[in-house]
Amino acid sequence: CTHLFTDHVHLPRSGGDVLVHAGDLQYEESRSLWEDKWKKLLAEPGKNPLTVKAVKDWFEKEKVSLGDSLKWLQSVPAFRDKILVGGNHDYILEQLDIKGIAVGLCATYGLTYLRTEDEPKPLPCSKLVVWGSGLSAMSQVGGTRAVISENYSYQHDMEDLDGFDRKTKHIYEGYQGPKPHLMVMHGPPCTSC
């Protein structure tokens, strides 16, 4: 999780096989100014359906921090593969996923975006088989939390374990493909995990 603090991240110059970003590229939420800007983008004539080019142009025009984070990940040298999942602060990334263009957008930055719905897949260079999900437990009021957070991207209700199973059973129930070497999630699906 970098939360926009990429200038504080120090990675080995020698790189490695796989760079993993487990979500929270941003520090945005559904009530942020980015939600308003996202809705304005969608309302523009000719922007539905969205294209990767239109989104990258929007990143540049509006100085969308997600674009800067993706560029930063792209610029990190000497890693054979780079993978990421979304997190609860990644509102725009989640919206791009819902629109069906997050995978393609991330690929233009040399990144493999992992989605809950996808089957495990081999990475392009290292050939490790990976699966990932931005799902994590939705915050609840109680204990030390007085309000529900608006950082609810990729969140799953902790009390809906059947729903979590429905979203993820394709990777274990009847799955005949290659077994993942690496599974990445933003956070556990429940507080008792």
Image: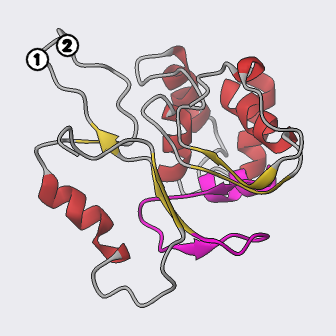
Query: Residue 145 — which label?
Result: 2
Quarter of the figure with residue 81: bottom right
> In the displayed structure, does residue 141 sit left or right of residue 169?
left
Q: Are marks 2 and 1 in contact (CB under 8 Å)?
A: yes
Q: Nearer the viewer, residue 83 or 91?
A: 83
According to the picture, the residue beneath numbered tag 1 turns out to be 142
On screen, residue 10 above or below 127? above
Q: Position of residue 96 (x, y in %)?
A: 56, 46
> Residue 17 in magenta?
no
> Residue 125 in magenta?
yes
Region of the chain picked out in magenta, as a range:
102-129
Quarter of the figure with residue 147: top left
Quarter of the figure with residue 61: top right
Q: Position of residue 88 (x, y in %)?
A: 42, 33
Residue at figure coordinates x 61%, y 32% from the top left: 41
Residue at figure coordinates x 67%, y 18% from the top left: 5
Circle 1 sits in a helix, a strand or a loop, which is it?
A: loop
Asked which colour scheme the image uses, the reply is secondary structure
Residue at figure coordinates x 44%, y 47% from the top left: 134
Residue at figure coordinates x 77%, y 27% from the top left: 10
Q: Nearer the viewer, residue 102 or 46?
A: 102
Residue type of the residue flagged with mark 2: Arg
Residue type of the residue flagged with mark 1: Gly
The quarter of the rendered structure image containing the N terminus is: top right
Circle 2 Cα neighbour tier, 10 Å, few/some/many (<14 / 14–19 / ≥20): few
Circle 2 sits in a helix, a strand or a loop, which is it?
A: loop
**Label 2, label 1: how far apart the Cα atoms are:** 5 Å
